[in-house]
Amino acid sequence: MSDIVEKSWDLQRKIEEKTRHIGKGKYGRVLRMARKPSGEEYVRISQIVAIGLVLLGGLGFLIYWIFQYGSEMVAKAFG
């Protein structure tokens, strides 16, 4: 029984030693500076993402349309 307890304490110490360095390495500064966005920031970011999705979707549809129907239009115009 005491062997299990000692193993669990060893495991606990190992976990604590590994997590002690969190916030002090490469990403520590980013983690310390991170904060929850305000409502206004969240809305602004959501709007920008939505505009980007619409633009990319429109561009994809335009490319699809050109490949689907563009050759026929070019053939009619010059043919």
Image (cartoon, rainbow, N blue to C red):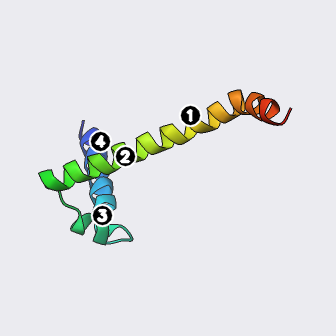
Residue 67 image position (x, y, % from top left)? 71, 33
Q: Circle 1 sits in a helix, a strand or a loop, which is it? A: helix
Q: Is residue 79 left or right of residue 10?
A: right
Circle 1 or circle 3, nearest the eye:
1
Residue 49 image position (x, y, % from top left)? 35, 47
Residue of label 3: 22
Near-viewer residue (74 or 12): 74
Q: CA distance from mark 2 to mark 4?
A: 61 Å
- Dot placed on the residue nearer the N-terminal end, 1 or 4: 4
Near-viewer residue (70 or 3): 70
Q: CA distance from mark 3 to mark 4?
A: 30 Å
1 and 4 marks in contact (CB < 8 Å): no
Q: Who's the residue at 26% across and 57% down the image? A: 16
Q: CA distance from mark 1 to mark 2?
A: 15 Å
1 and 3 marks in contact (CB < 8 Å): no
Residue of label 4: 3
Circle 1 or circle 4, nearest the eye:
1
Q: Is residue 37 visible?
A: no
Q: Circle 4 sits in a helix, a strand or a loop, which is it? A: helix
Q: Circle 2 sits in a helix, a strand or a loop, which is it? A: helix
- Quarter placement of the C terminus: top right
Q: Is residue 62 left or right of residue 68?
A: left
Q: CA distance from mark 2 to mark 3?
A: 36 Å
Q: Is residue 10 left or right of residue 75?
A: left
Q: Residues within 10 Å of mark 1 (few under 14, many from 20)?
A: few
Circle 2 or circle 4, nearest the eye:
2
Residue of label 2: 51
Q: Residues within 10 Å of mark 4 (few under 14, many from 20)?
A: few
Residue of label 1: 61
What mark, if any, has residue 70 been given in the picture? none
